């Protein structure tokens, strides 16, 4: 059974609290979440009685295939989407319409408002995004497959590494192999960072050969049916050095301590604090420069934000990353990341790649 009717019901149930008669959904990701439509330049009008997708003639066949059970209005070639929106809203008899202020520019708002006389547009924030935090079974299944593809690529690719391999070549190979396994591609540009490159959390792969670098950080993920996975492993050579090994054990302890606490009702900031406490015990907390993780879904970064200032509380159905890391400029970086599903009784780590110090050696 499709999950779309339930998603729309959850949205319409929120209209009274927002004091609006309808929602105009214009963000492409939110349109996809509510309708399954994967195109662009389209929007949804959602009222308690019906949902209508507004688009143009390029997508007539695609909407018919992807959006069963949803009304469709296709604008003509000489009609602005704004004018079609005004026509549809007027036909619904609505007076107050919610818009997502985070996903509409001021210029777009003024342009829309000018063409829709008699309708008041009410700014709202994150209405659909908050619904997306709790994943249904369709989303969980897609995420599992995204994780499986990412893991298979990693396990098949790592044994092929040589001293001549470059960061950028491996990043390209990751995406190539993902697509061969059925992924839409990468969920983000892979980070492949040899040696000191790993000390930059958002490093961009370069034409740097692995050569004699003692460590290799790889942060990668697949996208399957729209849903993202996000994993990181830090590999090392046998003679990497004691400072790396001590830091690695600290990061691993921090990640395991955080994962152990994941269950419904837990404050996100308390989980973040557990990871920081472990890093502090190892004397490496000062080298941790970002939040503990984030939600994943149709976007690689979704709610909840796993940070010390977060007010969010975990609930069953959330999928989050847990990714503590330490970074030493000019030397090395270490990050260990897994995707975790919050379940009714606790949690399930969706990723299965080994991550102990001895598990993560590589030989050139």
Image (spheres, helix red, strand yellow):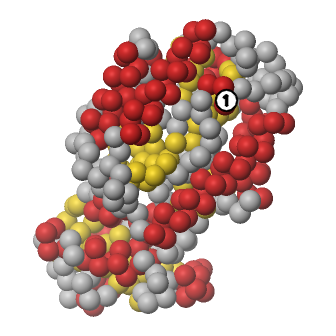
Residue depicted at x 58% and y 37%: 232
What residue occupies the far top of the structure in this picture? 242
Residue 347, above or below 268: below
Q: Residue drawn 79% across and 29% down? A: 166
- What is the x, y in percent for residue 222? 62, 52
Q: Is residue 101 visible?
A: no
Residue 203: x %, y % from top left: 60, 29
Q: Which residue does the image show at 13% across and 69% down from the upper left? A: 17
Query: Which quadrant of the figure has residue 33?
Result: bottom left
Give left or right: position of 33 versus 198.
Answer: left
Q: Is residue 251 above or below residue 85?
A: above
Label 1 packing within 10 angstroms: few (<14), some (14-19), many (20+): some
- Indicate whether 169 appears above or below 11: above
Answer left or right for 254 relative to 243: left
Pointer 1: what residue? 360
Residue 164 vs 44, above or below: the answer is above
């Amino acid at each position: 059974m499709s999950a779309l009717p339930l998603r729309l019901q959850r949205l319409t149930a929120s209209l009274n609290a927002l004091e609006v008669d309808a929602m105009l959904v214009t963000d492409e990701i939110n349109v996809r979440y509510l309708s399954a439509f994967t195109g662009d330049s389209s929007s949804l009008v959602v009222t308690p009685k019906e949902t209508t997708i507004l688009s143009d003639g390029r997508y007539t066949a695609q909407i018919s295939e992807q959006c069963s059970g949803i009304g469709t209005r296709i604008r003509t070639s000489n009609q602005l989407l704004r004018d079609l929106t005004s026509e549809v809203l007027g036909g619904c008899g609505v007076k107050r319409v919610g818009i997502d202020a985070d996903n509409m520019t001021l210029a777009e708002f003024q342009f829309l408002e000018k063409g829709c006389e008699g309708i008041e547009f009410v700014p709202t924030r994150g209405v659909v995004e908050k619904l997306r935090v709790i994943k249904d079974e369709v989303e969980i299944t897609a995420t599992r497959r995204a994780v499986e593809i990412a893991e298979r690529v990693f396990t098949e690719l790592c044994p092929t590494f040589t001293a001549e391999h470059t960061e950028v070549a491996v990043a390209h190979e990751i995406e190539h192999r993902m697509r061969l396994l059925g992924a839409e591609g990468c969920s983000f540009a892979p980070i492949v960072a040899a040696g000191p490159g790993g000390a930059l959390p958002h490093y961009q792969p370069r034409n740097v050969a692995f050569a004699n670098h003692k460590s290799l950080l790889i942060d990668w993920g697949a996208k399957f049916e729209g849903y993202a996975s996000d994993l990181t492993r830090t590999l090392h050579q046998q003679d990497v050095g004691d400072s790396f090994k001590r830091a690695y054990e600290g990061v691993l302890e921090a990640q395991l301590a955080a994962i152990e606490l994941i269950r419904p009702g837990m404050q996100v900031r308390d989980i973040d604090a557990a990871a920081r406490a472990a890093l502090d015990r190892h004397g490496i907390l000062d080298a941790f420069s970002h939040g503990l993780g984030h939600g994943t879904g149709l976007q690689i970064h979704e709610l909840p934000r796993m940070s010390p200032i977060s007010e969010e509380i975990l609930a069953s159905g959330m999928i989050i990353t847990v990714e503590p890391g330490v970074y030493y400029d000019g030397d090395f970086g270490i990050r260990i990341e897994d995707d975790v599903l919050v379940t009714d009784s606790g949690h399930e780590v969706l990723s299965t790649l080994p991550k102990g110090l001895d598990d993560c050696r590589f030989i050139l």
